[in-house]
Image: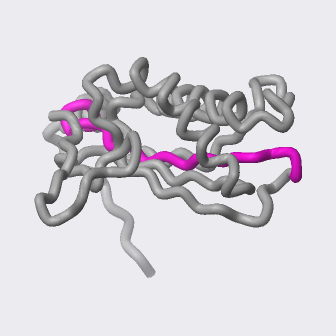
Amino acid sequence: MAPKAIVSKELGPVLGMYSHGMAVPAGEIVIVAGQVGMDAAGALVGPGDVRAQTKQAFENILKVLKAAGSAMNEVVRFQTFLTHASDIDGFMQARREVFPRYYPGGVYPPNTILVVSRLVQPELLIEIEAMAVKPAAAAAGRAKSRPVARKTGRRQATRKRR
C-alpha cells in the first residue's frame, strides 16, 4: 500500500506542493542524506541558480532511492535547507517542474523548509533530505532470499566452558 496523504479539516489548505502529513504502513525505512546540486562527477550544477541546483538535488535523491530499491513515490518526508529566503520561489518553481514526473497522482510528501546561514560549501544554495518507506512486502521478500542455515536433524556438538 502506498503512502496516504493526511488531510485535516481543522487546518487550512497547504501552501504549496506538499501534504500536511503522511500515513504509511510498516515497512523498511530509507533515509537519504542531504543531497545538493552536484553531478556524478562532483561538479556544481547551476552556480548561483537555485532552480538548477534543486532539480539536481532531486535527481540525486532519486539515484539514492533506486540504489536502495525504493522510488520517489515511497518518499514520506522531505526536509529542505536554503541559504537565502529569496530562493524559496525558485525552489518552488523547480518542484512545479519536476514533481509531476515523480508524483503523477498529485499527492506530495510533507516538506519542511529551513533557511540557514550556509551549507558545507558556500556555492551550494540548497540541500534536500528525504525519508522513504518501502512496502513491507518488498522488505519481507528480501529477507526470504537470504541464505538460511539448514537443519540436519543431528545435534550440534557443544563446547564445555572451563
Which residue is drawn at the image coordinates 73% and 35% (left, top)?
Answer: 37
The x, y position of residue 30, in whole percent, is 43, 44
Rendered image quadrant of residue 132? top left
| Front-most of residues 109 and 129 | 109
Rendered position, 59 above or below 85: above
Is residue 29 in the magenta section? no
**Quadrant holding the N terminus:** top left
Is residue 128 in the magenta section? yes
Q: How many marks on residues?
A: 0
- Left or right position of 28 against 99: left
- Left or right position of 92 against 8: right
Question: Which color scheme did the rendering employ for the protein?
Answer: one colour
The x, y position of residue 160, in whole percent, is 37, 72
Rendered position, 40 above or below 53: above
On the question of residue 136 being in view, the answer is yes
Which residue is drawn at the image coordinates 25% and 50% (left, top)?
Answer: 22
Q: Residue furthest bottom?
A: 162
On the question of residue 148 being in view, the answer is no
**Residue span colored magenta:** 122-139
Rendered image quadrant of residue 149? top left
Rendered image quadrant of residue 120? bottom right
**Quadrant holding the C terminus:** bottom left
The x, y position of residue 158, in whole percent, is 32, 61
The x, y position of residue 151, in whole percent, is 19, 38
- Left or right position of 36 against 102: right
Which residue is drawn at the image coordinates 17% and 47% (left, top)?
Answer: 25
- Left or right position of 154 against 79: left
Which residue is drawn at the image coordinates 24% and 59% (left, top)?
Answer: 12
